[in-house]
Image (cartoon, coloured by chain):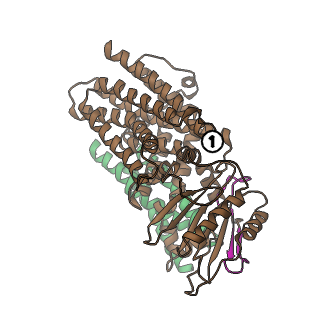
Amino acid sequence: MRNTFRASMALVHTTLGLVTGWVLFAIALSGSLSVFRQEISLWARPELSVTPSDPLLVDLHALNWLSQHAGHAGAWYLTAANERSPAATALWPDAKGHYVQRMLDPSTGSPDGIRDTLGGEFFYRFHFELQLPYPWGRLLAGVAALALLVGLISGIIIHRRILADFFTFRLSRGQRSWLDLHNLLGVAALPFHLIISFTGAITLGTMLLPWTTLVLYPHDITASYADLNPALYSRPASGHPGHLAPLLPMLKEAELHFRGTGLEQIYVFNPSDRSSIVTVVAGNAHTVSTTSDVITFDGPSGKILKEHIERRPVIRAYIFLYGLHVARFAPAMTRWLYFLSGLALATVIGSGMHLWCLKRLRRPGHRGHRIVFRLNVGILAGTPLAFSAFFIGNRIFPATMPDRAFYEVACVFATWGITLLYALLRRSNHAWPELLGADAVACLSVALMGPLWHGGYITAVSMTALALSVSFTLGTLHTTRKVHT
Amino acid sequence: MTARRALIMRLIAAIPVGYTVSALAGTCLCLWLPFSRADKAIAGVLAGLIVWPVIFIASFGIRDARRLVTLLLPLGLLMAALIIAGFRRA
């Protein structure tokens, strides 16, 4: 009986892995990069002066610039400057209603002279939206997260010797080595993998299961957002022109209320209307949870309209789990653990997919298996190549090129498409070393284009690219040997 | 019962039925918990996210696929009854 149970769990593990593996691989890899999204955003803008200054003043310069250049926009969404990110990033609708996202110069508040790029935001958005229209990308990512959770649980069940396999790695034994790698990394970072898949599903939970919200807020679904955080308050424009009160005192008052957590976000709604409001969200210096403390000011008077400190038990659990996933709280060391565990997850998924292919290719002649195997090479080796293309595009396109942020993203998908096509047409034992070699060269280019010796975050990101380039080179050498033997 | 039919039953139990039961479980919970409205809505979501993977695993883990019907059908009906009662109460 135990055996049939294991066998059916093995079926679940394998089938679910096959169906969702490619999407999950891309999600895991982009998620790992999102851990360093602010650092990547700084890498992507080498012209930015990053002399550290008071974050409040940086935010104030940004808001002043917005009031002069986007005064009639319906809203400004500002991601505040902090210790990790010396510049603020603003999102606002332009005159035609298209949303513009730009990083603003810390001393002038202006986006002029800073290249138009999504930076780390690209990987962050891709991680849960997959570049698909709303809500499909998010739903797919949510289902993939749950599939990963089930895949992990069924993986634990079929795995007989958790502890023994933790110390087992038989190198250069073909399929056996791949299984050892799959097990070793799967077991080593298992707590992280379980938590990240479940909390990932939680971040998209209200989309996957909207029923409770529909039942409890039958007449007005937007009331549920207001209820989730009552101080994230909005009110319609009055139609009468008005002026914002000085913003610095509001930011200082918010900072005082937050007791040293810093500011995470500043939203200004209808800035040139008499009913303008300013909302400030607390940072994560002392808490894992997101949006635990929010204050909204009346724009023209600067007086507090609403303040909300989260005390409701379930919501606190929710924002804690949410915070565990997005890791805004994480100090540098924790961030590296998230990054490495994320790469380990991508490796577990990739090696699992590869194992599936190896097992089936021993019985030759099945066309479907061969196509899956080739596409698998394309996805596993092509995704890092496509992501590297983003970084390379960032340095190659002229800083003043129109729509350059769009073309950077286009680079990713063009590279992905070409790589998949190449992998589909090429014999896989040749495609492996060739594509891994391309990954190594691409990562080396990213490191050199930084440039590596620039200093600060640019050196840090470039060094990481260099380390990845070295591991891709090892992979290339390993697979080249196989071609010749 | 053929293996193919058993597999189809398991798939139906795991995916559409599993999702429905988890949605029902969440809705049931949000109608009966004594918390604030926002708390209840989120508690239902969290519960649903736990229930679906559990039913998914159980759908393939249970030895006799026919037992899934005798297990999930009463469960679904019980929750539906609790939801109707919850609406009546509100």
Q: Residues within 10 Å of mark 1 (few under 14, many from 20)?
A: some
Query: x, y (%) of residue A206?
Result: 51, 63
Q: Residue at x 53, y 53 (%)?
A: A114
Residue B5 appears anywhere in the view:
yes
Query: x, y (%) of residue A323?
Result: 62, 53
Instruction: Count the numbered circles shown.
Output: 1
Q: Chain of mark 1?
A: A
Query: x, y (%) of residue A264?
Result: 66, 59
The answer to if A303 sits in the magenta stretch is yes
The vertical placement of A264 against A394, above or below, is below
Q: In the depicted view, which residue is nearer to us: A276 or B54?
A: A276
Q: In the depicted view, which residue is nearer to us: A150 or A286?
A: A286
Which color was chain B given? green
The vertical placement of A227 against A208, above or below, is below
The C terminus of chain B, quarter of image: bottom right
Q: In the depicted view, which residue is nearer to us: A56 or A363?
A: A56
Q: Residue furthest top?
A: A485
Q: Which residue is mark 1?
A: A335
Determine the image quadrant of residue A64: bottom right
The vertical placement of A475 against A122, above or below, is above
Determine the image quadrant of residue A59: bottom right
Which color was chain A given? brown
Query: x, y (%) of residue A87?
Result: 63, 54
Q: Residue at x 72, y 65 (%)?
A: A311
Q: Residue at x 68, y 64 (%)?
A: A60
Residue A140 appears anywhere in the view:
no
In this picture, which residue range is highlighted in magenta?
A: A283-308
The N terminus of chain B, quarter of image: top left
The answer to if A343 sits in the magenta stretch is no
Q: Secondary structure at mark 1?
A: helix
Q: Residue at x 67, y 58 (%)?
A: A58
Q: Amino acid at mark 1?
A: Arg
